[in-house]
Amino acid sequence: MPSPVLLRPLPRLLRPLRSSSGCSASAAQRLSHSVREHSRSLLQKYRSQEQYFKRKLKAAYGRFPEVSDHAVVQGRHHVYFEEGGNIYRKARGQSDQELEEVLIQSEDVVRGALQRVRLSPGERMLAATLKDPKSNMVRGLLVRLGDPPASPRVLLELSDMFSFEWASDDILLFTTMKELRCQTVHRLDLREMPLKSVPVYKEQDPEFFVEVSRTRDGTLLTLNCSSRSSSEVRLVESHMPLRCPRVVQPRLPGLVYHVEHSHRHLYILANTAPGQEYQLLRTHLSSPFMRSWVPVFTPAQGTGLKDMELCRDHCILAVRTPSGTLSLQVVPLANPTKAFALQDGTLVPMTVLHTASWGNLQEAPLLLHVYGAYGLDLSMGFSPEKQVLLEEGWVLAYCHVRGGGERGLGWHQAGRLQQKHKGVEDLVACVQHLFKLGVSCPTLAALTAHSAGAILAGALCNQHPHLLRAVTLQAPFVDVLGTMQDPTLPLTIEDRGEWGDPLADSQQRDNIASYSPLQNIKPQRYPSMLITAYEGDRRIPLPGLMEYVEKLTSAVQAHGVEWPPSIILDLQPGEDHFGPEDLDTSLNEVSRQLAFLYRELGLFCGGHRQRHK
C-alpha cells in the first residue's frame, strides 16, 4: 500500500450543526427537575462499572499515545507545533531541546483548546483561534513572531473569529461567527494605526455560510459562500489584497463548486457531471465564469469524486467507485488524459469490524453507528475506546445510509428532503441483514449516534424497537418539526435545504412529521437509552430535548412491563456539541456510556455474558 496522501478538506459546504426546539422554556423548567432527578438515580447503578472502564481507557490511551496528535505547521524557517494547549517552535534542523515559546496560555492570555493556526507568508505573524471549553467562546490571537533576540508577543485579540487567512505579512482576512452564523468577511491591515478591521463582504442570504480559505500555492484567498445545495466563490489575489473580491461564477440553484489555483489557471471541482456528480474543470484566471469551464477529468458513471489536492503539476483526486472502493486518481495537469490510479482501501455501504472469526459472531455484542445527513461521511476514525471494544469481542458496524456522502452527491440527494425516510429504511435493512448473516442478535445489539444521526436512530426506535437492546445518543437532534417551524433559531433557515420548510410547504411538513423522533413516540417497549447533552449547546436547545425525554419516559411507563427499559438524560455543563475536549472529562463520558452498554446488554466487564432479566 502506498504512503497516504493527506488531502485538505474542501471549504465546508455541509456541516453537522443542529438545533432543536420543542416545548416552551417554562415547560422545560417544569419538566427538568423530575427528568434530572430520575436520570441521576438511574445513573447510580453504573458507577462501579464506570470506574472500571475509566481505568481501562486510561491504559488504552497509554498504549496508543499517538492519538493525541500534535498539530504541526511548517514555516519558512521554523517548525511550529502544539503541546498542552501551547504553541512552540524550533528552527529547521534543530533538536527538540531547542524550543522557543510562541504562545503560552496564562491568566493574561485567553485559555482554551487550540482550533486553527495560520502563518503569514513571510513568517512574521501567526494567527490562532482558541475555544474556551466552558463557554464555547472563540477568540483569535495575533502573535508578532519577530527574529531573535526578540521574542514572540501577542499583538491583538479578536472576538468571535472563525476562519482566517493571511494575504500578506500585514493583511489578514477573517470571518466572525454570531449565533452559529458566519456571514461577514473582514480585513485587518496591520500597517494602519489605530488597528481596526473593515468589512470586505457581507452575505445577504441567511441560508448561506461564509468561510475564508487559501489556495494551495498561496496565490489566492477564496471567500466561499455555501448553502445546503449551492455555492459561490469570490477571489482575492494575495498580491492585491485591497481590491474588491471578484466572483468566479454567480450562484445558481443546485450548482456546487470549489476552487483551486495553479499557474494562472483555476481548477474547479463542480457538480456538473452526469447525475450532478463532481467533475474537474479548468479555466484561465482571467475568465472565471462557468461558460469558460473546460472539463479536465470526468469520472465514469456511478463513480464519485470526494476531494482534490493540487501538487505542483498534478491534481490528486479522491475517487469512490460504484463498489465502494476508495482510490486516488492522479491527473497530470499538462496531459489530463494520462491519469492513473492508486489503490487506498475499501469502503462499502456497511463496514463491519470484528476480531473473532465470522462464524463465531452470533453471540457477539454489536455496536452500530449511523449518521446519514448533510452529505457527510460517517466518521470511522480510530480511538482507543473502539480498540477496547474490539479486543473484548464486540462487532462494530458502520451503516453508510442514504443522506450521507459515502457514494457521492447522488447518495446525499437520495436521502434528504422528501427522501429522508430512505435513510431510516437503509438503517433497518443493515441491522436485519447483519442478523441474517449470523452477526449478533437483538438482545445484544446497540446503536450509537450523534447530532443529526439521532434522527435516524430515533426513527428506528419508534418503528422497530425490537431490533435493539440499547441506544446511546450524544447531543441528539430529535425534534426536526419543531426546529424547522421556528425561523428564529440559528440554523433553521440554513437547514431548509436538508430537511425542508414546513411553514411554506404542507407536503414537506407532513413528510418531516412522519419521521421526526419526538412526534412519533408511542407506548411500546423501547430500547434503553442514554442521552448525553450539554446545557449550553446552542445547536440543541434544552426545551425540545427535555420534552423528548419526558415523552419517551411516559410512553415506556404507559406500556407497562415488569422490567422497563432505562431512559436516562446525562446532562453535562458547558456548550459542547461534539463532546468535551478535555481528556479527563471525555474519559468520564465515554466510561459512562460503556458502563451503560455493558449493563443493559447483560455483559460482565471483560465481555462475558450475564443472564438477562
Image: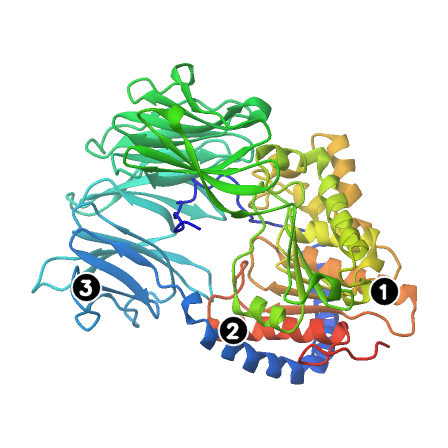
Note whether 166 is above or below 282 in the view shown: below
Helix, strand or loop at label 1? It is helix
| Badge 2 density bin: few <14, some 14–19, many ≥20, Cα 10 Å | few
Task: Determine the residue positioned at 80% across, 42% down.
Answer: 514
Please tell me which residue lies in front, 574 or 402.
Answer: 402
Tag 2: amino acid: Thr
Q: Which residue in the structure is indicated by mark 1? A: 556
Q: Which colour scheme appears in the figure?
A: rainbow
Real-space CA distance between mark 1 and mark 2, rounded to the nearest whole angstrom: 31 Å
Instruction: For the C terminus, give its image quadrant.
Output: bottom right
State which mark lies toward you, 3 or 2.
3
Question: In the drawing, does residue 127 fall left or right of residue 503?
Answer: left
Please tell me which residue lies in front, 305 or 102.
Answer: 305
Q: Where residue 568 sits in the image (x, y, percent)?
A: 72, 69
Name the residue furthest top: 291
Q: In which quarter of the image is residue 259?
A: top left
Note whether 476 is above or below 172 in the view shown: below
